[in-house]
Image (tube, grey):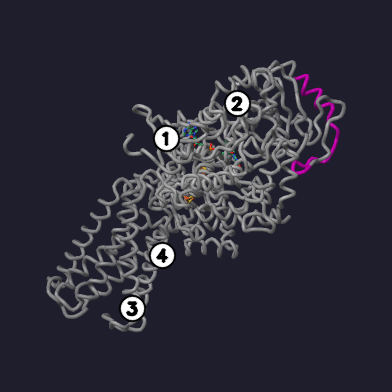
Amino acid sequence: MMENYPSFDVVIAGAGNAALGAALTAAERGARVVVLESSPQEFRGGNSRHTRNFRCMHDAPTNVQTEAYKEDEYFTDLMRVTGGQTNEELARMTIRESPKCFDWMKSQGVRFQPSLSGTLHLGRTNAFFLGGGKALMNSYFAAARKRGITVLYDTEVIGLDIAGGVFRGVTVQQKKGEPFQIKGRALVCAAGGFESNLEWLREAWGPPAENFIVRGTRYNRGKVLKLLLEQGVEQIGDPTQCHAVAVDGRAPQYDGGIVTRLDCVPLGIVVNNRGERFYDEGEDLWPKRYAIWGRMVAEQPDQIAFSIIDSQVIGRFMPSIFPAIRANSIGELAAKLGLPVDAVLATVERYNRSVVPGRFDHNKLDDCRTEGLTPQKSHWALAIDQPPFFGYPLRPGITFTYLAVKVNCKAAVLMQDGRAARNILAAGEIMAGNILGKGYLAGLGMTIGIVFGRIAGEEAARAAAE
Amino acid sequence: MPPLNDPLREGERLLVICNACRYCEGYCAVFPAMERRRVFSDADLKYMANLCHNCSECYYACQYAPPHEYAVNLPRTLAEIRVQSYQQYAWPERLARACQKNWLVAALMLLVGLTAAICGGAALGQGGGILISPGAGQFYRIIPHHVMVGSFGVVSLLVLLVLLAGFVRFWRETGEGFRALLHGKALARGLGDAFTLRYMSSAGAGCTYPNEERSMSRRWFHHLTFYGFVLCFASTSVAAFYSNVLGWAAPYGYLSAPVILGTLGGIGLLIGPAGLLLLKWRRNRETGDPGQSGMDTSFMALLFLVSLTGLLLLALRGTSAMGILLAIHLGAVMALFLTFPYGKFVHGIYRSAALVRNALEHERQGVEAGR
Ligand SMILES: Cc1cc2nc3c(=O)[nH]c(=O)nc-3n(C[C@H](O)[C@H](O)[C@H](O)COP(=O)(O)OP(=O)(O)OC[C@H]3O[C@@H](n4cnc5c(N)ncnc54)[C@H](O)[C@@H]3O)c2cc1C
Ligand code: SF4
Ligand code: SF4
């Protein structure tokens, strides 16, 4: 093995959206590129294979996005969700570059489509990949093959050879055999966050991490992130910050992807395993609240909660893959869900009594709410009294972590002394925390990945040529 | 959620996953049809299976494809359901099931048997004339005109009736009324989709068939096959008109309508099926139903043979080979006709019907949305 891959111009750790953006761009500039992917070929593409869209600025309607979504509105949205915890220079640069990435992706054979049904609220801001993220990745890999890029699967980066802030090579471990070195003249780190590393999550979250479900790949274990931090690269962000949603408690530990999400939360009530409500289920439109529920469930005892709805709202939310647990009375449902029956009965009874009459409309902020209840339910509050009743277990589903290496707008990682590394670049989840201090905007993960991936590819090719 | 053995149950399992995901919505009509539903009855599954043309896009694009534990392989499962539906709608069902076992052998045996019968019949009827050239294009001296017209007429009529019965069974099971077929716009759209092979073009990029790289080849070969068949059919019809109505006896000149139509159609019907067979041979076997191979292959092989013998007959009609060629050609045509209702041919009927139904559903949804 060793003799076959001794040295390349550009070494890329990871094979997701950011990595392939970098690989293709570096190869376009004439660099000899190797892509190192720790997963087997079938699971290549990390979390990117689970995505469906990216958030893209545009000044006029395009064939896949409606109306306009301009820089200032985009940036205002970002400021709102992060509470200002962002880097304005990097963020604005990302936003401005996004339409160029759209064109570039198309030039690589990526196909787009208007927003999927059920996600019309994203039809203006996001461009959807035809067939989703795996189709996107397939297009990239096909383009990479045409460009002669070497892709090694089952090849994990386990060591970085960095001397005086200058990259010289990586140590990799394949499925079989001894670890070996691959030399390179520039390195792009695009190996994702550490969301699949339960030990690291436990360090950050404590025992609750045991009950986290990882929505995406099992291969983003944060190895490269840790290696960089150990080499004196500046860290940014808090290890507990992440994107997490509430997923069905029956989801697999890894790779359950989009189909394990549950969209019924705003249509009923959510109780913890003591049978108590803990947050306003109808605070805002679901797409705006979707991403806070992971953290919310994580903070409950045993990191579990249960959504309870009745037959009035069945059919009004995106179907999920797990059947609802069904019962003819609230008591029976509580028993089936393994909840304290009296507590649930009392909660539902109190909630039902607090519901004030209104006109139900689950597509807008309606006037169905509770009065005199804590926590209150601000919208879509209908009495839960139409049998049969249904319940779904909820668990925190972690999407990706925000702890990151600090970068500049050339995608170069910054050392603790503030200097930019000459030939070490980072893109994607591994540096997304520079822009996302907390909170999330749907589609921004892929935008950060492709914008920084392309810059990193260009800079890596330049550094390698020097 | 492990995979299930019964294709219908497996189809249900997969569509529940797909309906929660929907990433493949833009590929074909199957996904929008799925999104109109939350539960999937067997009838729904068969309808959707016939909307699928097995392009495999949704397999390559699926993040849940094997080895993922959800093991989503929609093209293969829909193919299995589709074949089941062909058998179920065919009449008599038992014959369809028997044929399905080993198509290639069945079709070839039929061909040999029929050719032998025709040879035998001709030999008896005309006093051993089949191997002696009776003069350029003197087809009816080999097989009397009334025998030819009579036997093919009866068989065609029977075949048509059986095909119609299949269509009626399919349509009934979907729960649609027959009046719905009078919906002009939906009919035009559905049939338009069918005759242009709209979904095989995937907005100009082609399909991931025979393998992951997109190509238009299947669409072109299918067009050649189908329109080649139509031209051959037109040629035969014109010839029948000439001989039965106008009283102009065969053979017709090289520049006559039947010969030109038949030649063009025959060429299409040579290249088309050959191309489709080649693609089939090279296809990614993961996404197909291996049990269906014989049915597909025998249909294409018969089409090819019909065309080949037809063109040879035209070229050699003045030679002593004419008699035997005619027997083989007619045997092949007869075998093709007889296997129509029990073989791959029926896909055209169910697929077109499914596309019309899809157009109907689409129209109704539009009406509802407008309200
Ligand atoms: C279910 C789901 C849906 C999502 N939907 C969207 C969406 O619609 N839009 C959006 O913008 N974002 C979405 N996201 C977030 C998005 O997936 C990420 O932000 C984005 O994919 C990150 O891209 P990346 O290239 O940085 O990382 P990844 O795509 O995860 O790639 C990282 C790669 O590095 C490899 N790797 C890790 N460690 C090593 C190592 N030591 N050596 C070698 N290789 C290694 C991994 O195997 C992987 O291939 C979604 C995430 C999930 C889980
Ligand atoms: S085939 Fe896979 S990617 Fe496509 S809709 Fe179904 S589950 Fe989703
Ligand atoms: S194989 Fe092609 S036609 Fe069939 S469901 Fe998948 S995308 Fe649609």
Could you say where residue B50 lies in the image, as x and y percent from the top left?
Answer: 47, 51
Which of label 1 and label 2 is nearer to you? 1
Q: Is residue A72 magenta?
A: no
Amino acid carrying label 2: it is Gly
Q: Circle 2 marks a residue in which chain?
A: A
**Pointer 1 and pointer 4 on the same chain:** no
Q: Which residue is mark 3?
A: B260
Mark 4 within 8 Å of ligand 3, using the beta carbon: no
Real-space CA distance between mark 3 and mark 1, rounded to the nearest whole angstrom: 56 Å
Q: Are marks 3 and 1 in contact (CB under 8 Å)?
A: no
Q: Secondary structure at mark 2?
A: loop
Q: Which residue is mark 4?
A: B223
A307 is higher (above) or lower (below) than A121:
above
**Pointer 3 and pointer 4 on the same chain:** yes
Amino acid carrying label 3: it is Ile
**Pointer 2 and pointer 3 on the same chain:** no
Choose between B50 and A206: the one closer to the eye. A206
Mark 2 within 8 Å of ligand 1, using the beta carbon: no
Amino acid carrying label 1: it is Pro
Q: Which residue is mark 2?
A: A249
Q: Give the mark nearest the N terminus, 3 or 4.
A: 4
B238 is higher (above) or lower (below) than A346:
below
Real-space CA distance between mark 2 and mark 4, rounded to the nearest whole angstrom: 50 Å
B279 sits left or right of B51 in the view: left
Magenta residues, start to end:
A345-364
Real-space CA distance between mark 1 and mark 4, rounded to the nearest whole angstrom: 39 Å
Real-space CA distance between mark 1 and mark 2, rounded to the nearest whole angstrom: 27 Å
Q: Are marks 2 and 4 in contact (CB under 8 Å)?
A: no
